[in-house]
Image: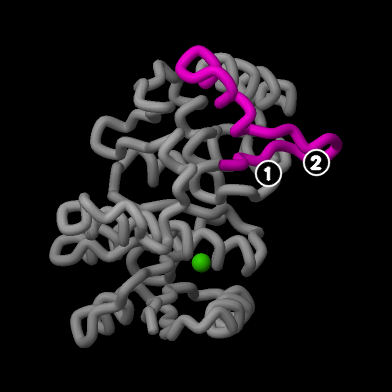
Amino acid sequence: MQRILLVEDEPAIADTLVYALKTECFEVEHVLTGREALDRQADNPFDFAILDIGLPDITGLEVCKQLRENSSIPVLFLTARDGEVDRILGLELGGDDYVTKPFSPREIVARVRAIMRRSEGRDERPRSSTDSTSPTADPSDSLLAHDETSMRIVCDGSPLELTAHEYKLILVFLGQPNRVFTRDQLLDHAWEDPGAVTDRTIDAHIKTIRAKFRAASPGSEELIQTRRGLGYAYVP
Ligand code: CA
């Protein structure tokens, strides 16, 4: 059973998350402060950390920094404000993902699973390069791949020339295949200041992303599907 450390000082948020994660068969330990989190991790290391950024003692960002000094534990940040997202991205703390409040517990569970899948792949790559039939790997994923080191998206073997926003949008989709994202959700995830742009911005970016996919591999533009009246989904 995977053990998750949840660091969140708002009991109402923590309770719903603990419940949702336990329902999904994770073992969850909840603490209210950053110091407690570091102590628990030192006592008995966890497999995953969910860190609220606004904590009463030290920030979640600082907790992440200290956790990462002696482990590669995957980290999902919970943020209350868009301004905090800038800091996560700007400080390059090595958090694996972030979710802006308010969120649904289901969204968190999906993110945790996606990050765990990614980090398992990261650990296994050197050992299992000859094993292409890993049970968690989706065989059609190979059309679109994320090269984390060079921060590039590769479509059917060709690295794409993307703007920062196009890159972040594609990462949002890759994190949760088949999920339908509304335009607002995509703005929240991929823009540091979503208030400054409109829904149309998303449509324009999806259009250029599809064109770049198509140029790299005809037909691959259909990986990003339009759900009329709802939004967009990445369908591998
Ligand atoms: Ca808080």
Task: Check disc 2 and give the amino acid type.
Answer: Leu
Q: Residue at x 38, y 77 (%)?
A: 5
Taking the image as shown, residue 122 lies to the left or right of residue 220, namely left
* Magenta segment boundaries in residue numbering: 213-236
Residue 12 at x, y percent in the picture: 63, 78
Taking the image as shown, residue 172 lies to the left or right of residue 145, namely right
Residue 228 at x, y percent in the picture: 83, 35
| Mark 1 surroundings within 10 Å by alpha-carbon count, few (fewer than 14), some (14 through 19), many (20 or more) | some
Residue 32 in view: yes
Residue 83 in view: no
Q: Nearer the viewer, residue 108 or 92?
A: 108
| Mark 2 surroundings within 10 Å by alpha-carbon count, few (fewer than 14), some (14 through 19), many (20 or more) | few
Q: Nearer the viewer, residue 7 or 179?
A: 179
Q: Earlier in the sequence, mark 1 or mark 2?
A: 1
Taking the image as shown, residue 126 lies to the left or right of residue 150, namely left
Residue annotated with mark 2? 230
Residue 178 at x, y percent in the picture: 63, 48
Residue 165 at x, y percent in the picture: 50, 26
Taking the image as shown, residue 144 lies to the left or right of residue 181, namely left
For the image, the number of numbered tags is: 2
Q: Residue at x 54, y 78 (%)?
A: 21
Compared with 89, 209 (above or below) is above
Q: Which mark is residue 47?
A: none
Looking at the rendered structure, the secondary structure element under dot 1 is: strand
Among the 4 quarters of the image, the one containing residue 76 = bottom left
Q: Residue at x 47, y 64 (%)?
A: 112
Query: Separation of disc 1 and disc 2 at Cα?
Result: 7 Å
C-beta proximity under 8 Å, tags 1 and 2: no
Q: Which mark is residue 181?
A: 1
